Image: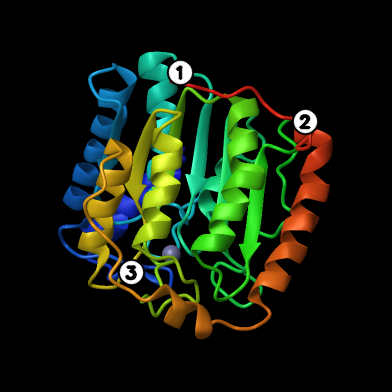
Amino acid sequence: MHTEEYVASVTASIQQSRKNLGKDTYLCEGSFDVLLQSIGAVLRAGEVVANGSCDHSFALVRPPGHHSGKCTSGGFCIFNNSAILVHFLRHAFGIKKVAILNIDAHASDGTYGIFSADPEVLCISVHQDPLKVYPYTGFIKDIGVRPALGLSINMEMPPRSGNREYGILFEDIIEKVMRKFDPEIIIVECGFDAYHKESLSELDLTVDGYYDMINLLASQWKVVCLLEGGYHEDIGLLSAVVLEGLMGRRTIKDGIDQVDLLASRHINTRKEFQEKLSKLKLILNPYWDLNKPALCHTK
Ligand SMILES: [Zn+2]
């Protein structure tokens, strides 16, 4: 959650007609209303799942939130939607264990900063290797701090990683960790900038990849998706795919040629991915015992 001083400084900046917060987060006259409406939609999306009236939900909101820390803005984000939702779920519904999964192409640094010491929140971020990419944090070695060591997981996806690499990561680590943690609700920081047509990243997810990830989660847990980044004109199509993934009903097919996509990929992508995956397993094993199977979880 944010400090009162930070919220007051955002409000003052808007009232003073400042055009931005820092160098990359924009403001305008209507920003405060938009922020309140956006947070209202996020809370509503959490409420309908928490009270049982919906199995899953998707808040299609802007601005995004995952780069915003306790008292910082950044990367177009002003307030951290996931953190505000966790706070709401705890206080309004008594929900204790929440998992947050970021699939935006950029590391969920704001969310990590807020929850890295919180033993009741599992934070997983799957993003492009941040060595040369914003926010330049979110490395495999970043696993949270006491008393929540091991409850933050960061995976650096090499450039040109696509459906197959994400699929392996979900199967080998994310699904196992989720089963062991057993969250009451999963919040997905659903960014569409890991899409293969997106120019802001070098990742290669397709419609198939997004559907499979969301459907795998929704078939086992309660899921609240929150829109994060993604700037290609196909984000409408991808939003529809996510809704289909939540419902488990597929009608939208991938129109792209997987062979062409694979042929364009850097030859070392899979090798580099496997090396990073092994490194991540090694670091997480003391906390999650990934070789020992977890019981299959059903909602
Ligand atoms: Zn992003």
- Distance from the alpha carbon under mark 2 to that under mark 3: 49 Å
268 vs 97, nearest the viewer: 268
- In the rendered structure, the answer to whether residue 209 lies left or right of residue 231 reads right
Apparent side of residue 25 relative to residue 100 in the rendered image (left or right): left
Q: Is residue 115 above or below residue 47?
A: below
The vertical placement of 51 against 247, above or below, is above
Label 1 sits on what residue type? Answer: Ile
Whichever of labels 1 and 3 marks the residue nearer the N terminus, that label is 3
The numbered dot on residue 146 is: none
What is the three-letter code of the residue carrying label 2?
Lys
**Residue 292: which disc?**
2
CA neighbours of label 1 inside 10 A, class few (<14), some (14 to 19), many (20+): some
Mark 2 and mark 3 residues within 8 Å of each other at the beta carbon? no
Q: Which residue is mark 3?
A: 20
Q: Nearer the viewer, mark 2 or mark 1?
A: 2
Q: Nearer the viewer, mark 2 or mark 3?
A: 2
Q: Earlier in the sequence, mark 2 or mark 1?
A: 1
Q: Examine the rendering and report whether any part of residue 70 can be seen.
A: no
* Number of residues whose C-alpha sits closer than 10 Å to that of mark 2, classed few (under 14), some (14–19) or many (20 or more): few
Instruction: Describe the element under mark 1 as helix, strand or loop.
Output: loop
Q: Quadrant of ligand 1?
A: bottom left
